[in-house]
Amino acid sequence: MGTYLNPGNSGFQTITNGIYVDKTGLIDYVNSTINTPLKLTCFSRPRRFGKSFAAKMLCAYYDKGCESRSLFEGLEISHKKSFWDGLNKYDVIYLDITRFISRSNNKGDNVVSDMQLAVIEELKKAFSDCINENETYLPDALLSVSHEINGQFIIIIDEWDALFREAKNDEKLQKEYVQLLRGLFKGGVATDKTIAAAYMTGILPIKKYGTESALTDFVEYTMTNPAKLAKYVGFTEPEVKSLCKAHHMDYEQMSSWYDGYSFNRIQHVYNPNSVMKAINNEEFANYWTSSETYESLKNYISMNFDGLRDAVLSMLGGKRVKVAVSTFQNDITSFKNKDDVLTLLIHLGYLGYDSKTGKAFIPNQEVSDAFADAVKGDEWKEVGDLLQNSEGKKNL
């Protein structure tokens, strides 16, 4: 068991030891993609929406270095035909990009090369005769191992977009990172031989350069179009009702605070982190946002784009506003208009989005509170006064 190669199942075991909502159906989806043209999946969601939980679950299921059958018995995946197809049958490469960033003193210059060397070092220990001593390029190291053992890897990348968020102005580093991902996942025959499937998760969809995705072979599921993975974005209405009943929580309050995200296939999706904290604390409150996110939201909604302020005002008044989401470049620097800013807020979870109407809206009480804090400033004075007066009337 290693840090990056076959990390084991302890992470998922810890998750299931607490209050657990069964999302193992996602495994059935990934199983269906193995060694098919759809084997590369990127599933982006806001922070605190269970991204790392899903990554740890997939590691526990596929990792051939551990035995996980007992962890999954009785869960949804155990009743699927595909249950035995991948259970502990693959060497897994697990990359948490935030971990590599935190190891770097300046978030930067050597992150991509350090990441490759760290993984290659573990590969050398496990497959000592398979890799050239001086190898520094991860795709070639994986190809060498795959050739020698006649086996494939499953690659799981958590917070895949962290470099685009943390080193947002370092274009050189970002391009180096994209080139590594292309080497891993766009290698034709080499990739087919090496990788059985890949699953990436993060906040932002895959970076665009103009109208083209940086990684065109990935199938993407996002907050603007989660398609058949919609029920894995967060908690669904039946799941939350069941939790409320089991833990004697008021469902109507839970819905008001944390529901509001809706998609074509699933009409009610809840912020999972906030639901769990409300249950654990036996109290409804704003658990998702923090002082840092208030400042971030304030910076975004105060950008000088025509129509942005009016759009925010409309949504604060309970209305929905039209948003063109297709031009967004999937980063936090390349804003050209109000639609780009609003689309980012959709991916960050500050706004809900109805793909049928193409309209965005403030989804629930928790997010509304974040907006209320963000507009408490001189440039939003009249809005802040309006919200304060409204709140005062509600409390009379």
Image (tube, rainbow, N blue to C red):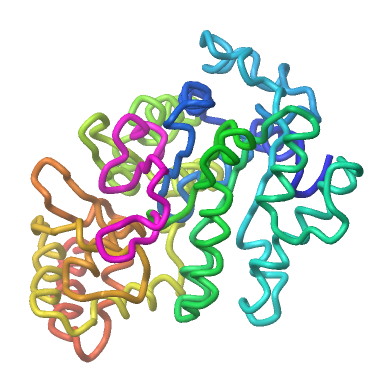
In x, y percent, where is residue 214?
Answer: 40, 58
- Indicate whether 248 appears above or below 77: below
Tell whether 259 sits left or right of 244.
Answer: left
- Indicate whether 80 appears above or below 276: above
In x, y percent, where is residue 203?
Answer: 43, 56
Name the foreground residue: 356 vs 371. 356
Q: Residue 210 lies in magenta, yes or no? A: yes
Residue at the spot x=67%, y=31% of the render?
Answer: 152
Q: Residue 124 lies in magenta, yes or no? A: no
Q: Quadrant of the C terminus?
A: bottom left
Query: In the current view of this chain or complex, which residue is farthest to the bottom?
Result: 378
In x, y percent, where is residue 220?
Answer: 37, 43
Tell whether 59 sits left or right of 226.
Answer: right
Query: In the current view of this chain or complex, which residue is farthest to the front?
Result: 189
In x, y percent, where is residue 109?
Answer: 64, 79
- Indicate whether 35 appears above or below 97: above
Name the foreground residue: 176 vs 41. 176
Q: Quadrant of residue 169?
A: bottom left
Q: Quadrant of the N terminus?
A: top right
Residue at the spot x=41%, y=49% of the render?
Answer: 45
Is residue 264 at all visible to an observer of this figure? Answer: yes
Tell whether 250 sits left or right of 317.
Answer: right
Tell whether 285 sits left or right of 338.
Answer: right
Residue at the spot x=84%, y=61% of the render?
Answer: 134
- Indicate whether 141 appears above or below 199: below
Q: Quadrant of residue 316?
A: bottom left
Is residue 22 at all visible to an observer of this figure? Answer: no
Q: Which residues are magenta?
A: 206-234
Residue at the spot x=13%, y=76% of the render?
Answer: 309
